[in-house]
Amino acid sequence: MAAIQQGRRGGPIVGINMTPMVDIVLVLLVIMMVSATYIVSKNLKVDLPKASQSDESIPTIVKVTIARDHQHYVDDAPIAKESLAARLHAAHEKNADVSVVVSADAKSEHGDVVHVIDLAKAEGIGKLAIQVELTK
């Protein structure tokens, strides 16, 4: 027959320590919650209904790039500095919710960046961003 284990004081062990089991269950619960959120958000496929008209305008992003040789580019196409204001005006006329992202070379002049921001503000564009590269 199996022998009954004795405790420190000589009596049988009648209680089970629940603390390790509760710790394991809580860790498994956290893992399940995190993985379930990731799985649902990445793999949920929904066929959205189609509409012929929409009240909401799609925000447009105009990317202005300034190279170190002072050359300006709008959406990766070269543009003269004099034509930049007209291009920003046309983008704002097309969509009033347009955003301008300024991406300048580290060796470009500060005045060029300020000039682009001033042109955008003069055309009534209020959403501006400056693109940077994060370093670790």
Image (tube, rainbow, N blue to C red):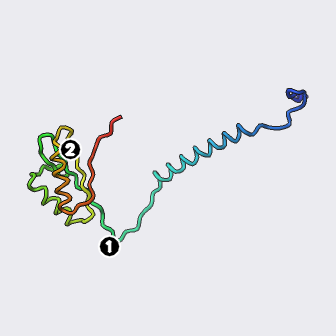
Instruction: Give the numbered dot on residue 104.
Output: 2
Residue drawn where x is 80% and y is 37% of the image: 16
Amino acid at circle 1: Gln
What is the number of the mark on residue 53?
A: 1
Mark 2–mark 1 Cα distance, whole angstroms, equals 38 Å
What is the number of callouts on the image?
A: 2
Say which amino acid is labelled 2. Ala
Q: Is residue 36 left or right of residue 64?
A: right
State the image quarter where residue 59 is shown: bottom left
In the rendered image, residue 51, in percent from the top left (x then y), is placed at 35, 71
Depth-wise, is mark 2 or mark 1 nearer the camera? 2
Kindly indicate the quadrant of the structure image that contains residue 57.
bottom left
Q: On screen, 24 above or below 4? A: below
Residue visible at 42% across and 63% down? Answer: 47
Residue in the image at 18% along x and 44% along y: 110
Of the 4 image quadrants, the one containing the C terminus is: top left
Residue displayed at 19% across by 57% down? 120
**Foreground: 121 or 90?**
121
